[in-house]
Image (cartoon, rainbow, N blue to C red):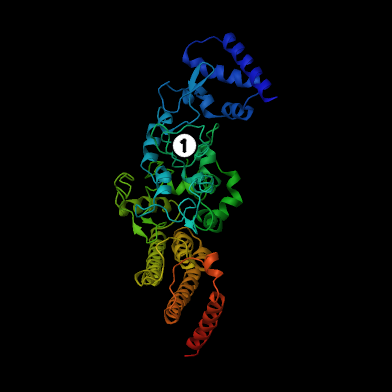
Amino acid sequence: MGIRKSAQVAIIAVFLLLLFPLAASADDGERCQNCHSAIGDFPAVVDDWEQSKHAESGISCSDCHTAEPTDPDATEHNGFYISPVVSPNDCATCHEKEVAENAQSLHALGAKYYEVDFYNQKLPYLESEITLDGYSTASHNATVNGCQGCHGTNMTGKSTDDPAVWPNNGIGRINPDGSLGSCASCHTRHKFSVEEARKPESCEQCHLGPDHPQTEIYLESKHGAIYNTEGDEWNWDADDWKPGEDYRTPTCAACHMSGTDELDTTHDVGARLSWELETPVSRKTDNVANILGTPIGDGSTWEEKRESMQSVCLECHSEDWVLNYYENGDAAVELYNKKYADSKAIVDELYEEGLLTEQAFDEPIEFKIYEVWHHEGRRARMGAFMFGPDFVQWHGFYELLKDKAELVEMAEQIRLNAELQEQLGLEDTGTQPNEETAATPGFGITLAIAGILAGLFIFLKSKK
């Protein structure tokens, strides 16, 4: 049936090409629409485009999808060369300012940050990087559907035939033409709705969960409560979207991107951020360039970025209110930095003493210290600047306190085990006993005695 349908589609396509002969390029989009409509192919795509502002402005399929034969992502299609991958370079034909701003944003670097961490090292916690007991999954079977679903894939030198890179609309996708990002990540194809991108649901695809809890924090905040109560009544598609006129309280886009009386709109989502709250240790954002060697932002200092964000807050709040809130937020971030340093020192000492292996994420304590900053620490810090008190306390600093207690106990246990092994003359190889060793006469007895002595040793230590 599949082959028969393909043949039918080909015949119809040829007929339509004859019926609508090649003319000026302005008619290419109409031929695309006529063909797809006639064969019933992608009806939702056609419907979305017909409802879009692109259609109103005469922007057709060919304007975005036409490719040169020499383009790295060019595909021959019914006598035309097209590309399924619409990159920011394509969008820049009409949206030059927006594309330039996005290119200097943290969003555009999403795929690059997937490949390395904040210190220019390979991400050790990715499924593809972990090797335990000789087991490795270097094919990215999990991360291509997980991390890269939001961060974006690297399509350099690859085509849409490769399932490791396509389909993907990750925010920092590295496109075949070398550009960074996917505009369709927020303005989903083929409607490309401004209203959709302004609503927090657009950001929820990526900014949620234990490590990126912005969605949950926003929904807990008073901002989120007002949005959920009356957001349906707001004017979402106004060209000049203004607080107090078109909406009552901010969404993600309102704070990070939309304009005010003093600010222009921007597609650089970090242009108003004075702290980096996602890193293990928070720092101010004088990030004209980063560890990747890629420029970030327009060169503004963290003070200038802060002034920009505060001008958004001042649309609804008094100056005292805003300054006091920032002072409390700063204090919370600095408190986290101290708590993280104290907890990290516990693990660092174990490395210095040679009590942890060089392999990343093969011991429980390594997962624990990772979650201190990547989970609890992010919730505490982001909650402090996004009106999320429950995330600051119970999902944040309370968990940090609990984590430290567990780290202290885990470190003590590791040292006790090492001391016991030394007393028994056992060598910790960091591996499980193999079948040959386990079958050796006396091994089971030795192991049992070691277990009894370990329990007795720990009991006596606890009584001191």
Disc 1: CA contacts within 10 A as few (<14), some (14-19) or many (>=20): many
Residue closer to the observer: 194 or 453: 453
Q: Where does the image place residue 384, in percent across and percent down from the top left?
A: 45, 62
Q: Where is residue 125 in the image (x, y as percent from the top left)?
A: 46, 56
Would you place residue 191 above or below residue 399 in this image?
Answer: above
The residue wearing badge 1 is 183
Q: Where is residue 286 in the image (x, y as percent from the top left)?
A: 30, 53
Q: Is 166 positioned to the left or the right of 2 in the image?
A: left
Q: Quadrant of the N terminus?
A: top right
Q: Is residue 30 above or below residue 351?
A: above
What is the residue that sits farthest to the front in this orientation? 441
- Residue 199, image quadrant: top right
Residue 236 visible: no
Q: What element carries label 1?
A: helix
Q: Toward which corner of the image does residue 91 lie, by quadrant?
A: top left
Identify the residue at image location x=56%, y=19%.
Answer: 32
Q: Where is residue 104 in the image (x, y as percent from the top left)?
A: 35, 42
Q: In this view, does 414 lie above or below 367?
A: below
Residue depicted at x 50% and y 86%: 462
Residue type at mark 1? Cys
Depth check: give the residue in front, 104 or 154. 154
